Image (cartoon, coloured by chain):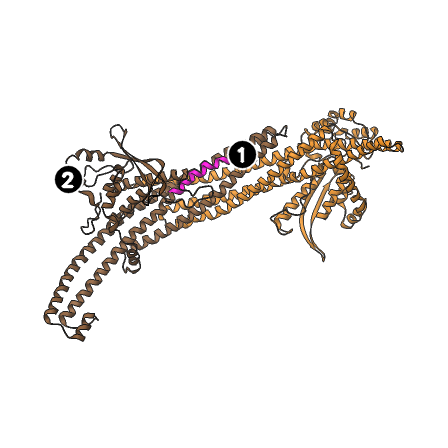
Amino acid sequence: MEGDRLASQARSSGLPAGGATGESPGVDAPLLGGSGSSALLQAEVLDLDEDEDDLEVFSKDASLMDMNSFSPMMPTSPLSMINQVKFEDEPDLKDLFITVDEPESHVTTIETFITYRIITKTSRGEFDSSEFEVRRRYQDFLWLKGKLEEAHPTLIIPPLPEKFIVKGMVERFNDDFIETRRKALQKFLNRIADHPTLTFNEDFKVFLTAQAWELSSHKKQGPGLLSRMGQTVRAVALSMRGVKSRPEEFMEMNNFIEIFSHKINLIDKISQRIYKEEREYSDEMREYGPIHILWSASEEDLVDTLKGVASCIDKCCKATEKRMSGLSEALLPVVHEYVLYSEMLMGVMKRRDQIQAELDSKVEALTYKKVDTDLLTEEIGKLEDKVECANNALKADWERWKHNMQNDIKSAFTDMAEENIHYYEQCLATWESFLASQTDLHMEETSEDKPESH
Amino acid sequence: MEQAPRDPERQLQPAPLEPLGHPDAGLQSAVGEEAEGARDESPGEGTMTENNFWLKKIEISVSEAEKRTGRNAMNMQETYTAYLIETRSVEHTDGQSVLTDSLWRRYSEFELLRNYLLVYYPHIVVPPLPEKRAEFVWHKLSADNMDPDFVERRRIGLENFLLRVASHPILCRDKIFYLFLTQEGNWKETVNETGFQLKADSRLKALNATFRVKNPDKRFTELKHYSDELQSVISHLLRVRARVADRLYGVYKVHGNYGRVFSEWSAIEKEMGDGLQSAGHHMDVYASSIDDILEDEEHYADQLKEYLFYAEALRAVCRKHELMQYDLEMAAQDLASKKQQCEELATGTVRTFSLKGMTTKLFGQETPEQREARIKVLEEQINEGEQQLKSKNLEGREFVKNAWADIERFKEQKNHDLKEALISYAVMQISMCKKGIQVWTNAKECFSKM
């Protein structure tokens, strides 16, 4: 059915460098086109002869080449995936760069909405040009995500930022909200670009390159709404079944996902709360400093000291603001993205279970039916392939996802720790220099002391 | 050394001075000044050794606090805290201290002592007591008087009060103060026998004087403004500080949640597990470090509070001056009016209205003898009045001189103490920052090893 076009996993999918910016090294040109044949494969091996690094990569994965069948549904073992992703980042392999910016408000008689400018720069051959600029709205992103999920039901599609803000904000058009969404949308597209399979998805390409009217007409193709709804209903019915016969490794995966989801949600809440507390602390500090200035007006002999304290408090206040902004840039978006990812993962598990359930129900049918056994057997054969494909796709993507997750989390928390260290270092310097100035003054005063003062 | 002004009328000297033997037991504190040699008062028989004894350095400490129950004046059960006061004398030669007195006092006795001092030393800025009830409380701090942290801080405050009194050049010589430290039983009765409550100026009188006095010394007016400002700004500062403390507490404590969640998460992670777990531990350390930090800050707040309450003591001295000045003005006015009356009677002219004058007009003139008698009475009164005015004037001037001397002493003390407090605040912040750097550096290491 859907072409699970896994690029040969020979090229490293790369490790995302520091989660937040979405600048992950990308994937190379696929070694397999729509149909893989050994001839084609070998041709491409030759083509890339000049590049030493690529050869290196190839030779390391020779075993992989041998193991795999040359059908498009190429199963890869998770182990081999891990081997690949341990390679160093090779930024020059990334050939698709996407930025999302310039949010603009559009008002029509029916509605008001925001569009974002999307600029794509690429060196890939299958793109007609090397640079594209289009405008898209949130709805378009939703469409893209839907198409990707349809095409690759057991791949881990990156999450989109929420449609609505859960609490706290009244308008959709608040500046902070738009900025946060813009960053998340950019992350979304870049994650797709970095994904070894999704990056070659046709709808993705259309999304990045088509003009508005082209996109509309493209959207109209494909299974209609009713058929998609029908699929959903069946899917729900089947998914329950799939859970019962889930293989061991997927049970483990599911267990992980459940616990991870719970924990990451808690961490999201904790992190938001910390931000809020820091905000309130900063507000109080802003009032605290000036009181010392006020006091200094009635104390002749304490003016320096009081003003010094006031200045220190103000500086620490600014340092807190900086810490907060660091938190909101480095930690909060990453944690929140993984909250959304955990929801995606649950969806992926469900879809896998559905596919399995489809097979199981047909197998069951076979045991009861006496007629049409040939047809059923053929269908079962196809479904068995489908299941195997889906499982393998998920397994591979799971390892990739987990690895990325660990790096992103590690990065985000390391940054947070760094922000805190920097904050305390700044405050320390401020107070130490104040203290030094006070003791210096004191030394001056005592040395000027005349005998009479005692 | 300064003396309290001797006013035969007012008996500013504490009463039971003579009966108990020798005047002015010269108490010195470890903080305060050395004795300027023995006081040359008449040493009573058998007091020679005591005199010499008190010339040595004294250490005073409020070393313990204990919860007690007892019956109060209305025979109802009540719980209160008693504080152990220990007095030690320090031998000059080897610096060893010997416990000489130890007794238990409760807060209300301290109040009694202070009220007594306020009455007998109105020209002195009398050190304040620590607050009776917890104020400027931030949410975690308890407002309960029985809370051990509050009791501890109050213990320190009471000790501070005693040390301040003991290091004051005048107050340290007071007999009642000496007895407070040495005579457990019967002390209350002794204080009350001085009759100081009767000598206290009524609040109403003082208030009246404040509004009606015409020519107070400008310095005192300025001082009053200053004390108002001091009180206002320190209150404001303490209020905001309490809010800041609250917020800071929140920031630190929320991080503690990371510890728990990281630990739970580490259970499902293979490679990341150890890093998460140990990072979580550091988050716990971070969260719990705030308790000590804020407790130290509470001591800083107490130092500021002392000066908040000192503002009230300053105002008390100003009020006393206003009262005396008002008294003086009234006496002068009274004298002037009597003189005028006298003059009128002598010359027969009536310039001012008087009831006597009216009745005389209505009911007939008085006889020359009567008039003479009245003039004589008035002349006596005028004489008396002039004497009184002279002594009041003298008293007033003495008061201003002595009060101002103590105010100067107070100003220096205040500048020194507040500066030290602000510097100690900086030291606290530095310590907090250093702790923060350490914890986050450790956490960062754990994160980077994940």
The three-letter code of the residue at mark 1 reads: Met
Closer to us: A365 or A74? A365
Residue B4 seen from this side: yes
Toward which corner of the image does residue A112 lie, by quadrant?
bottom right
Q: Chain of mark 1?
A: B
Where is the N terminus of chain A found, in terms of image quarters? top right
User: Magenta: predominant secondary structure element?
Assistant: helix
Under circle 2, the secondary element is loop
* Residue at the far left in the pictured view: B369
Mark 2 to mark 1: distance in Å? 69 Å
Q: Which residues are magenta?
A: B281-302
Whether A39 is drawn above or below B388: the answer is above
Q: Which residue is mark 1?
A: B283
Q: Which residue is mark 2?
A: B42
Under circle 1, the secondary element is helix
Residue visible at 40% across and 48% down in the picture: B235
The picture's colour for chain A is orange
Toward which corner of the image does residue A342 lie, by quadrant?
top right
Closer to us: B18 or A62? B18
Residue visible at 29% across and 55% down in the picture: B206
Q: Percent from the top left, x then y, of residue A148? A: 75, 40
Toward which corner of the image does residue A405 lie, by quadrant?
top right
The picture's colour for chain B is brown
